[in-house]
Image: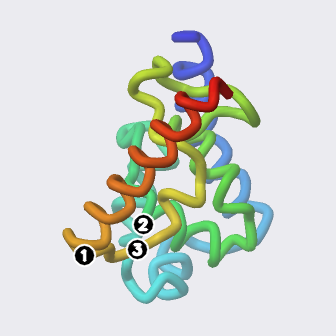
Amino acid sequence: MAKLITQTRNNLAPYLASVRAKKRLTLREVEEATGKEVSNAYLSQLENGKIAKPSPHILHALAEVYGEPYEVLMEKAGYIGRRGQSPRSSDEYHGGVPTYAVENLTEDEERALLTFLAMYRKTKDEKGR
């Protein structure tokens, strides 16, 4: 499993660089296209592997500019595993892209989601599924 994490994260830098090259965009053009959410200096560090795990928010901005699936960038950054695989141990697994896709949850919303999940898991365990 540790091999998956390393392999996944090591793929992010060259992947981002190759996608940008294919789109024939400069670092500055990407900066402008993201509304300066991703600076050209930060993107350069990402592409050179100096930043291994950018925030999901940054990956979302890049996915939109590049026209690439957000899920692919999340996988290459080590946030999610390939279908059915977790990049972390099972007790640390965050989930998939849908749980990262909701932006700006309030504390109340987050608590409500966690309460619902706990209730769902308890019901599921009681049914033996």
Tag 2 near tag 3, CB within 8 Å = yes
Task: Tell me the residue at 54%/68% (across/down).
Answer: 60
Q: Farthest residue in the left direction?
A: 107
Q: Position of residue 122 (x, y in %)?
A: 46, 37
Number of numbered discs visible in the structure rendering: 3
Q: Residues within 10 Å of mark 2 (few under 14, many from 20)?
A: some
Which quadrant is home to the N terminus?
top right
Residue bearing mark 3: 103
Query: Disc 2 marks which residue?
Result: 57
Q: Is residue 103 above or below residue 49?
A: below
Report whether 119 appears left or right of 4: left
Nearer the camera: disc 2 or disc 3: 3
Residue kind at label 1, given as amino acid type: Thr
Q: Nearer the viewer, mark 2 or mark 1?
A: 1
C-alpha separation, residue under disc 2 versus residue under disc 3 = 8 Å
Mark 1, residue position: 106
The CA distance from mark 2 to mark 1 is 16 Å
* Residue 45, above or below 129: below
Amino acid beneath label 2: His
For the C terminus, the quadrant is top right
Q: Residue at the spot x=42%, y=57% of the render?
A: 116
> What residue lies at 52% left-to-right and 66% top-to-bottom?
101
Closer to viewer: mark 3 or mark 1: 1
Q: Nearer the viewer, residue 62 or 44?
A: 62
Marks 2/1 in contact by CB < 8 Å: the verdict is no
- For the residue marked with disc 3, what is the amino acid? Glu
Secondary structure category for the residue under label 1: loop
